[in-house]
Amino acid sequence: MSRSFQVVLKKVVDHSYAIEIGERLFDSLIEDLQQGLVPNVSKYAIITDSTVEPLYGRPLLERLRLNGLEADLFSFPAGETSKTRETKALLEDQLLQRAYGRDSCIIAVGGGAVTDLAGFLAGTFGRGVPSLNYATTLLAAADASVGGKTGVNTPVATNLIGVFHQPRKVYIDLAAWRTLPAREFRSGLAETIKHACLGDAGFFSDLEENLGKVISDRGQLVLDAGVCERIALANCRIKYEVVEQDEHESNLRQILNLGHTAGRALEAVSGYTLLHGEAVAVGLVIQAKLGVKRGYMTEEQAERVIALLKKAGLPTDIPDQVSNRQLMDKMYTDKKVRSGRIRFVFQDGIGAMKRFADGSYSVPVEEAEVMEVLEEMRQL
């Protein structure tokens, strides 16, 4: 005879947080900490990478210490190839060596790789400690500032190991965009264009009209302040409208993977020689061309997407060194794969997403159908 005991753990959790958009936000961050944004914390760990460390990591460390806050800086080599379990373990060991415990707060300073890795670390260190994100790139502002998805890459797949961990606040420093190489900024524009494609036809038209005010036809950064602020706000708003309804990606949130089924695969197969946004741009083209064949969008709408990506200086072709077979095989590691079948999310025209008869936003696509589009892209 056996007995059972019911463990009841029902609770309502408020994961709300603010996103502050502006220039040079260190003073705001320190004021927030002094006013109790993160209570019961005695030590702050700044997590950054080797590129951002001298520009923002060390200056923030000095400011925190000048204001009487105990803080240390932890840095790892810049780049997506460092976003691994091994890097996370090294950082955890360094935190432990400096006596960080559950009274710690993680401050992630940098781009998407930093916020992904630092957020995952915060979600598991001491079984979860509070974190703040100080986003210094457009990619981090577009992709990592809303939603709380954190994770690392493995040789097999990207971002399949991680946790949902919401920051206490996000700071988007528009001044930092002026320190970005043009290629990095363009990479962030890919996620921005993705958001317009999936959620806001008006924003898409705004980008078509005003993209030249942030980046020139020759690929030089212009960064008109008003347009940059509009881009940052629109990215946050569109992503929030999705995440609010589906925090843990049970269905609707899959639409944020637009362009990512092929894009993440291409990023990995390229050995991360392609930046995330560059790979996603090609993934958006593959999705659009598949969508035309399936009747989800018109040829003209697909051409508008491709033209906007090109205007941003982003690639729209599969690199010659990546074979269709390599790309196809890597798509099978996508987290939307179910029962060995690759699934895509699709635009419904421009500014909306296709919802299928079963209520799902993703749909299985046969390998032959994808291969046909890949072959056609090679011949253009």
Image: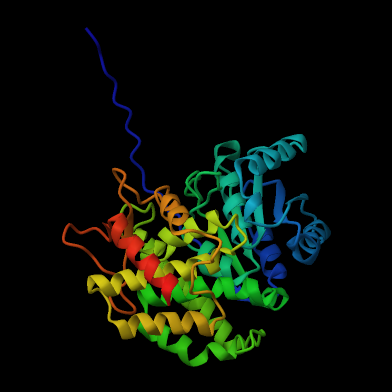
Q: Position of residue 318 (x, y in %)?
A: 49, 67
Quarter holding the N terminus? top left
Q: Position of residue 173 (x, y in %)?
A: 65, 72
Q: Position of residue 105 (x, y in %)?
A: 65, 49
Q: Nearer the viewer, residue 110 or 271?
A: 271
Q: Nearer the viewer, residue 341 or 75?
A: 341
**On screen, residue 286 above or below 228:** above
In this rendering, the count of numbered labels is 0
Residue 231 visible in this rendered orientation of the protein: yes
**On screen, residue 71 above or below 172:** above
| Among the 4 quarters of the image, the one containing residue 276 | bottom right
Q: Nearer the viewer, residue 36 or 72?
A: 72
Q: Nearer the viewer, residue 162 or 168?
A: 162
Residue 245 visible in this rendered orientation of the protein: no
Quarter holding the C terminus? bottom left
Residue projecting furthest to the left? 357
The colour scheme is rainbow
Q: Position of residue 275 (x, y in %)?
A: 59, 64
Q: Residue at x 36, y 43 (%)?
A: 11
| Among the 4 quarters of the image, the one containing residue 121 | top right
Residue projecting furthest to the front? 379
Residue projecting furthest to the top? 1
Residue 54 placement, left or right of 280: right
**On screen, residue 310 above or below 287:** below
Q: Residue at x 60, y 89 (%)?
A: 217
Q: Residue at x 33, y 65 (%)?
A: 372
